[in-house]
């Protein structure tokens, strides 16, 4: 892109000032419009060091209402952030509906910097590019406007600006060793930047090259492009987007009706013996996980009253409390609902060496949200691919991903519902919603079967826990977790 780039003609001073005044006023008006239409806008400013990203950004946001935008300055990842997946620190900063987030530097700077310094191999660089393309596509498919600007500057002009900054004790801090190295290796950096721009220039999230020779001209280019992008996004905001063909390695899994439950039992004596042995083994493995910095994500889904809570309790009681967390997932809070549906799960990922246990998960998108019309058909149809993509990111990061479906039959659920309703200390466990969901058993079963078939990947498989006998299901869960951890170790 940089090789073929045509800078365009800079307007005369008078025209530039006139257009800039109009554009600033229009963008401020558009901010009100995106707030009303609940359009989230993510603006990424990348480019060479000393190209003026920060100062131009300061001018762009000057006329915006500060209550409805944030600026994220993406410096080098902290030690805490390095213990999470690569995309984590970017995903958690995406804007809520109706607001801007401006990234001053972002995932491009991180990936190209790591590649240039030798921290990433060619293969790892390629994988990062694919992750970024998926990340940006997921955002735009879910209604985000993603605007990406690259500030271009020549080698001599960059050196001139850096020398000026370095000559003043109040501004020398703005020039980093990385910037100086970048100027010394300008041609090499330009080649890598060009490759990155070419590979991540997508129709849904294109790159705009900005001439940064003059800051007012740069501000005008970006402001007018933002206005045009917002207008286009508002026109397309409610339109469906293509559902991608599933290209992930999926293996067959039986339908729920074909899974035998009655013969999956365990005696009380055998249960006590095996529980003690399994919990002891898991406790030992937890220490090894921490030492080897391997994260584990355990996801529970299942019928109401299937025994998820008791199952999780037996897992958690075997773990060091400093190294795990259980996340009970309910309906999204308003600030969660205002963002991409996976945002609240990215926010709950464990550090490496730790374990996260989810009681209900991101699969709500293709079950309750699907059946209760909390999202459109296009939304949940797309979600199978997006979820497989999300779990692939976790697996590529190095996480062990274990997904349990806790299965019972309809009669067993009725017995447990009735017991809860008739036992005062258990009545809090049963709600009107549980009874309503039971009436949709067949619809839910169809949705669950489709979910299992489309997301039973080789890197994040489903395990069905036959839970008519809760004790049997607990031992099976423990053994499954032990097996998966031992396999990785």
Image (spheres, helix red, strand yellow):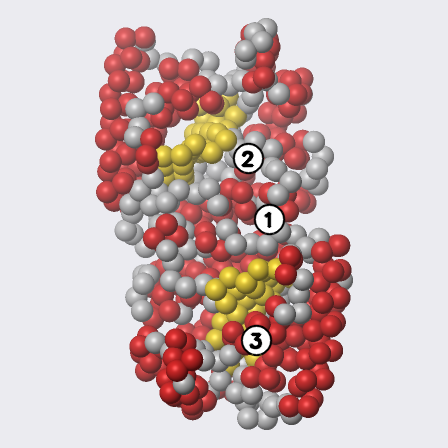
Q: Where's the C terminus, which quadrant? A: bottom right
What element does badge 3 sit on?
Answer: helix
Of the two numbered discs 3 and 2 in the rendering, the one whose residue sits closer to the viewer: 3
Crowding around mark 2 (Cα neighbors within 10 Å: few <14, some 14 to 19, many 20+) is many
The mark that comes first in sequence, 3 or 2, is 2
Q: Quadrant of residue 58?
A: top left
Q: Which mark is residue 108?
A: 2
The mark that comes first in sequence, 1 or 3, is 1
Tell me if I can see residue 447 in this picture: yes
Give the residue number, with chain letter if any, for mark 3: 311
Give the residue number, with chain letter if any, for mark 1: 85
Looking at the image, which is closer to me, 485 or 227?
485
Q: Quadrant of residue 230?
A: top left
What element does badge 1 sit on?
Answer: loop
Query: As drawn, is 268 to the left or to the right of 375?
Result: right
Q: Position of residue 435 (x, y in %)?
A: 33, 80
Crowding around mark 1 (Cα neighbors within 10 Å: few <14, some 14 to 19, many 20+) is many
Q: Quadrant of residue 479?
A: bottom right
Looking at the image, which is closer to me, 385 or 346?
346
> Would you place residue 146 above or below residue 227 in this image?
below
Query: As drawn, is 350 to the left or to the right of 220?
Result: right
Of the two numbered discs 1 and 3 in the rendering, the one whose residue sits closer to the viewer: 3
Looking at the image, which is closer to me, 142 or 28?
28
The mark that comes first in sequence, 2 or 1, is 1
> Would you place residue 488 above or below residue 7 in this image?
below
> Would you place residue 136 above or below residue 421 in this image?
above
Is there CB contact under 8 Å for labels 3 and 2?
no
């Amino acid at each position: 892109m940089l090789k073929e780039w045509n800078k365009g003609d800079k307007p005369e001073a008078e025209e530039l000032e006139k257009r800039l005044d109009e554009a600033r006023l229009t963008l401020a008006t558009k901010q009100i419009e995106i707030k009303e239409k609940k359009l989230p806008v993510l603006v990424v400013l990348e480019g060479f060091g000393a190209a003026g990203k920060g100062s131009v950004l300061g001018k762009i946001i000057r006329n915006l209402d500060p209550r409805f935008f944030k600026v994220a300055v993406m410096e080098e990842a902290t030690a805490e952030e390095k213990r999470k997946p690569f995309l984590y620190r970017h995903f958690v900063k995406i804007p809520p509906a109706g607001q801007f987030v401006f990234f001053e530097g972002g995932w491009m700077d991180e990936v190209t910097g790591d590649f240039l310094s030798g921290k990433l191999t060619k293969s790892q660089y390629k994988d990062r590019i694919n992750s970024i393309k998926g990340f940006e596509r997921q955002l735009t498919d879910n209604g985000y406007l993603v605007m990406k600007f690259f500030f271009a500057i020549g080698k001599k002009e960059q050196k001139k600006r850096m020398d000026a900054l370095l000559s003043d004790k109040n501004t020398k801090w703005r020039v980093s060793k990385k910037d100086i190295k970048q100027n010394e290796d300008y041609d090499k950096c330009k080649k890598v930047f060009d490759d990155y721009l070419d590979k991540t220039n997508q129709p849904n999230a294109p790159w705009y090259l900005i001439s940064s020779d003059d800051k007012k001209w740069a501000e005008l280019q970006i402001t007018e492009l933002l206005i045009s992008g917002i207008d286009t996004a508002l026109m397309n905001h409610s339109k469906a987007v293509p559902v991608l063909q599933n290209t992930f390695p999926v293996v067959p899994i039986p339908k729920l009706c074909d899974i035998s439950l009655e013969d999956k039992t365990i005696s009380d004596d055998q249960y006590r013996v095996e529980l003690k042995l399994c919990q002891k083994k898991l406790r030992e493995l937890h220490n090894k996980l921490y030492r080897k910095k391997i994260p584990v994500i355990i996801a529970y889904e299942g019928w109401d009253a299937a025994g998820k809570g008791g199952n999780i309790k037996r897992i958690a009681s075997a773990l060091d409390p400093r190294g795990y967390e259980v996340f009970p997932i309910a309906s999204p809070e308003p600030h969660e609902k205002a963002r991409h549906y996976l945002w609240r799960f990215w926010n709950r990922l464990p550090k490496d060496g730790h374990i996260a246990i989810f009681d209900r998960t991101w699969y709500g998108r293709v079950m309750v949200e699907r059946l209760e019309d909390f999202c459109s058909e296009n939304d949940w149809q797309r979600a199978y691919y997006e979820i497989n993509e999300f779990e692939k990111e976790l697996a590529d990061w190095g996480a062990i991903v274990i997904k349990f479906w806790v299965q019972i039959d309809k009669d067993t659920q009725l017995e447990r519902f009735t017991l809860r309703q008739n036992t005062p200390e258990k009545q809090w466990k049963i709600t009107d919603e549980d009874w309503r969901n039971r009436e949709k058993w067949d619809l839910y079963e169809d949705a669950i079967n489709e979910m299992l078939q489309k997301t039973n990947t080789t890197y994040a498989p489903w395990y069905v826990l036959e839970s008519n006998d809760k004790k049997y299901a607990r031992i099976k869960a423990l053994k499954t977790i032990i097996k998966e951890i031992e396999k990785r170790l």
